[in-house]
Image (cartoon, rainbow, N blue to C red):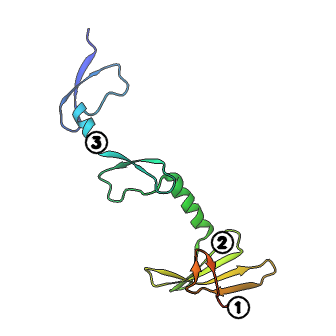
Amino acid sequence: MSKWRTIACEECGTDIHVHEDWDNPPMFCQSCKAAHQAKWYDKRCEGCGASMHIHRDWDNPPMFCQSCKAAHVASLRRGQKQWVDKSHYRVTSADGQKSWLYETDGWTSTCIEVADHYPDGTTVAYEADSSIIGQLFHGGKRRRK
């Protein structure tokens, strides 16, 4: 005796023949399954180049894989913003030996001071100027706090 039965595709209602012994019978017919699979594509992570599976209907597809996102979040936690006032915040390195003071208008941020913090409690601050190359500050005015 046949152990086959017919169920309806959840998407379009087309008949699907399934065996009653199957633990996980299909929910969609072949054409609906193919249409669902066509909505996915692969994209490279902009951080490490790993392959990511992206859905075409997503409004904001990710640029970074989960590993790169986790690493970025961890780095932000190490250098969290500490607001000084409404228009200034400070970011401190993970080891606490350097900090950067930023001025912001809500859209953009400009580094205005770099400070070196020493174990004896002294701080040497450098005023950031237009001769910044990466995180190197040349010719800034030094002041001891």
Closest to the observer: 138 or 135? 138
Q: Is residue 102 above or below residue 44?
A: below
The furthest residue to the right:
120
Residue 57 in view (yes/no): yes
Residue drawn at point x = 51 percent, y = 53 percent: 48
Disc 2 marks which amino acid? Ser
Residue 136, position as x, y percentages in the image:
63, 77
Vertical order, 75 against 104 (above or below): above
Q: Name the secondary structure under disc 3.
A: helix
Residue 83 in view, yes or no: no
Question: Residue 19, percent across and down?
Answer: 30, 19
**Which residue is labeled 3 in the image?**
38
| Residue 15 vertical position relative to residue 38 in the rendered view, above or below | above
Residue where numbered disc 1 is placed = 143
Residue appearing at x 66%, y 86% in the figure: 126
Disc 1 + disc 2, Cβ < 8 Å:
no
- Residue type at mark 3: give it: Ala
Q: Indicate left or right for 10 with 122 as reference.
A: left
Between residue 89 and residue 110, name the one nearer to us. 110
Q: How many residues crowd mark 2 within 10 Å: few (<14), some (14–19), many (20+)?
A: some
Pointer 2: what residue? 93
Q: Nearer the viewer, mark 1 or mark 2?
A: 1
**SS at mark 1?**
strand
